[in-house]
Image (spheres, rainbow, N blue to C red):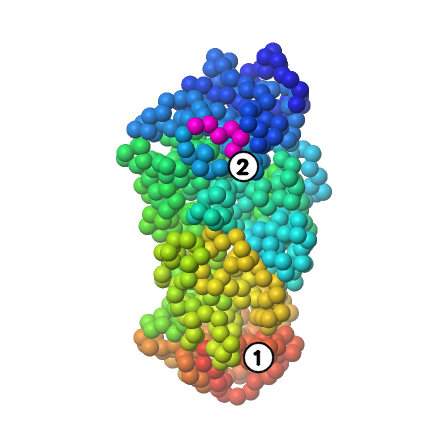
């Protein structure tokens, strides 16, 4: 970096925010309403003890309204920088300025983390120059997208795979070269597996730069729900160690996934940051405008905590609203992502005092933004403060994680009493939750497992959580898992228990992938990945959380079952040539339904009922008949008569060993009896093809 003279530095502009590379230099702009002084720091390396250059901004020349800005000629992409901000330290008024701390740019597009990074140094008194994360200037014009653009698959053709970028390939069994394990590039190597599985979208757990040290002592934050930036891809997933590596590698990953026909949905955390509560570190937002970025308590020296993390982002404050919208636009326009899943999205419905709003401005900003039109939007419609909005989240474009689907399907399939009446609603997109109109019923994202809680294997292998490795005395994580260990707690060689667990896994997968709505699968559930009973593995960056690829051999029958289910969901009806329905969801939306018990037209809604059957008739005559037995004994279900002369064929029977558990359409064996004996804890699906 060449030496700069004072005359080289000019006033610059307040817009755009962040560090923006221009023809002959870089314009810097940040918001800080109550600051009295701002210094821009330029560094050669992330670990430098002192900046190579300090540029003190003159309030008379370098401030417009509440924006501090400067133009520095000659700077290039890759320049490392940070800020020091001086202002009143008055927590009672919500001000927590600390000029000793180096701050990230809230709009910084890349972040470097020095080897000596210290969350503690950012929390304690004193300066932290050498140990602070720092921002990097990025030039987006130099990347060749080769014509890439978001894919925009219709929801009816969408099957989501929730996954962790690092955990997908970190296990030695991944076959990825050691230097690429756990990276964006490592994920690229495994794209053929995702294609073979048949999913159409990957939902990436947080990839915004996060604080890996925000975890119990001796452990590492693995999940990534502790963001320090809303614009920078996480540097820990980059193989390259230069300052621009994370941005370039992330874009290469997006381009490769799109070439393979896979959409990319980002799990975004616009509800809190890694700066935590009153004793937390000063990394970015707190040092610029603590009273703007966070919802403060009535005692403004403290933070309102609706997230369980110590602070809550002030999403409907105008500056924060703009930042959220700018972030989303950036990831769509410059990084080509296809959609977003909003963690604890109900935070977006709270005002600056934390009160729920009827028409939250930030949600409508996102809903109506033309740049985001057509982007997939998914809400986790609750928060840790008790606000639960499943079925009532504001807006028309949003889908919702359907927590009721998860809970009711888990309860029924493990044999709970009093749950049979809920199952029909869950299988037809929860009209009791979302309303009777068909467009409303498209809002449901159906899942039985996600990153937060038991894996599917553990859901059928443990009655209670086992989070001892987290260092919190097994107090963390929910105690309400709606799980069933099938008769033995944890791993077992008992073939009867293992057979039952395998069947239950297939039952839950069948319910998820046949139900109306959009299905979501958790990484590794297709091969019974286990976390050994840990239902809150947020700080387990080890084999507890990683995808163990050897499981594909041990549980290859489950993986095959998932592949067939996904393929048939997306292509079954077109294969059968039933009217003009390209997918199973399209067919089911137009079908008429009849509900039965073991006897036709006589569903048993009793408290101790554990069985149901459904007949779905398409307008052109095609039919499916599904029988669900969550009872501990086999039950004989009556079958509808086929007056048109088309006989039944067995598509799925989860009690059968592979490959008979799920058949290809042309290989499905006929079944002619008036009744079908459905084994205990099993699901059977028959179909009647026209003219068969």
Query: In terms of sequence position, does the residue under pointer 2 or pointer 1 come before the other?
Result: 2
Residue 127 part of the magenta segment:
yes
Label 2 to label 1, Cα distance in Å? 54 Å
Q: Which residue is mark 2?
A: 116
Q: Which residues make up the magenta segment?
A: 126-131
In screen coordinates, is 435 left or right of 542? left
Q: Is residue 169 above or below residue 633?
A: above
Within-10-Å neighbours for mark 1: few <14, some 14–19, many 20+? few
Give the percent coordinates (x, y) of residue 238: 62, 44
Residue 661 appears in which quarter of the rendering? bottom right
Q: Which residue is mark 1?
A: 657
Q: Residue shown at 43%/51% (left/top)? A: 380
Give the position of the C terminus as an image quadrant. bottom right
Residue 312 part of the magenta segment:
no
Give the position of the N terminus as an image quadrant. top right
Give the percent coordinates (x, y) of residue 42: 58, 24
Q: Nearer the viewer, residue 349 or 101?
A: 101
Q: Of helix, strand and loop, which one carries label 1?
A: loop
In screen coordinates, is 275 left or right of 29? left
């Amino acid at each position: 970096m060449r030496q700069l003279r004072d005359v080289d530095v000019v006033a610059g502009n307040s817009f755009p925010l962040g560090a923006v590379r221009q023809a002959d230099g870089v314009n810097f702009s940040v918001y800080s309403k109550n600051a009295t002084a701002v210094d821009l720091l330029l560094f050669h390396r992330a670990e430098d003890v002192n900046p190579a250059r300090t540029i003190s901004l003159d309030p008379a020349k370098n401030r417009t309204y509440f924006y501090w800005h400067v133009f520095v000629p000659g700077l290039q992409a890759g320049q490392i920088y940070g800020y020091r901000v001086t202002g009143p330290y008055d927590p009672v008024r919500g001000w927590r300025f600390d000029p000793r701390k180096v701050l990230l740019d809230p709009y910084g597009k890349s972040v470097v983390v020095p080897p000596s990074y210290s969350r503690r140094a950012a929390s304690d008194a004193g300066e932290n120059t050498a140990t602070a994360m720092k921002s990097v200037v990025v030039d987006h014009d130099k990347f060749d997208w080769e014509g890439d653009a978001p894919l925009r698959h219709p929801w009816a053709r969408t099957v989501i795979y929730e996954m962790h970028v690092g955990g997908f390939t970190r296990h030695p069994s991944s076959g990825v070269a050691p230097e690429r394990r756990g990276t964006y590039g490592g994920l690229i190597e495994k794209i053929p597996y995702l294609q073979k599985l048949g999913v159409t979208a990957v939902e990436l757990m947080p990839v915004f730069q996060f604080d890996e040290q925000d975890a119990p002592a001796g452990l590492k934050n693995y999940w990534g729900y502790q963001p320090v930036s809303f614009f920078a891809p996480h540097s820990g997933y980059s193989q390259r160690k230069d300052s621009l590596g994370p941005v370039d590698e992330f874009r290469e990953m997006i381009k490769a996934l799109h070439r393979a026909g896979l959409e990319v949905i980002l799990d975004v955390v616009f509800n809190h940051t890694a700066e935590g509560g009153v004793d937390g570190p000063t990394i970015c937002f707190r040092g610029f405008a603590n009273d703007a970025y966070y919802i403060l308590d009535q005692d403004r020296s403290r933070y309102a905590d609706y997230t369980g993390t110590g602070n809550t982002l002030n999403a409907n404050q105008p500056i924060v609203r703009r930042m959220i919208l700018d972030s989303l636009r950036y990831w769509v326009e410059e990084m080509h992502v296809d959609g977003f899943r909003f963690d604890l999205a109900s935070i977006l419905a709270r005002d600056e005092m934390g009160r729920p709003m009827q028409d939250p401005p930030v949600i409508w900003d996102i809903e109506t933004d033309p740049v985001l039109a057509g982007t997939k939007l998914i809400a986790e419609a609750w928060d840790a403060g008790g606000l639960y909005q499943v079925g009532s989240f504001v807006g028309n474009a949003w889908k919702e994680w359907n927590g009721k689907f998860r809970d009711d399907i888990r309860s029924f399939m493990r044999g709970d009493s009093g749950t049979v009446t809920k199952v029909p609603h869950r299988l037809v997109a929860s009209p009791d939750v979302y309303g009777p109109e068909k467009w409303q019923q498209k809002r449901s994202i159906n899942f039985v497992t996600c990153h937060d809680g038991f894996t599917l294997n553990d859901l059928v292998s443990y009655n209670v959580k086992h989070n001892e490795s987290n260092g919190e005395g097994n107090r963390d994580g929910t105690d309400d898992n709606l799980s069933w260990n099938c008769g033995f707690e944890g791993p077992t060689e008992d073939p009867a228990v293992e057979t039952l667990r395998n069947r239950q896994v297939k039952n839950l997968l069948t319910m998820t992938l046949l139900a109306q709505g959009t299905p979501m699968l958790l990484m590794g559930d297709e091969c019974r990945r286990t976390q050994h009973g840990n239902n809150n593995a947020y700080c387990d960056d080890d084999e507890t959380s990683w995808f163990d690829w050897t499981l594909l051999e041990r549980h290859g029958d489950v993986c095959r079952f998932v592949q067939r289910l996904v393929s048939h969901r997306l292509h079954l009806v077109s294969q059968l040539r039933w009217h003009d329905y390209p997918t199973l969801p399209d067919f089911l939306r137009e079908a008429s339904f009849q509900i039965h018990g073991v006897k036709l037209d006589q569903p048993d809604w009793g408290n101790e009922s554990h069985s149901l059957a459904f007949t779905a008739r398409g307008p052109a005559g095609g039919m499916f008949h599904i029988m669900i037995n969550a009872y501990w004994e086999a039950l004989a279900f009556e079958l509808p008569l086929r007056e048109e002369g088309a006989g039944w064929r067995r598509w799925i029977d989860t009690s059968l060993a592979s490959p008979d558990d799920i058949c290809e359409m042309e290989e499905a064996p006929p079944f002619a009896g008036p009744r079908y004996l459905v084994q205990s804890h099993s699901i059977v699906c028959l179909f009647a093809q026209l003219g068969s």
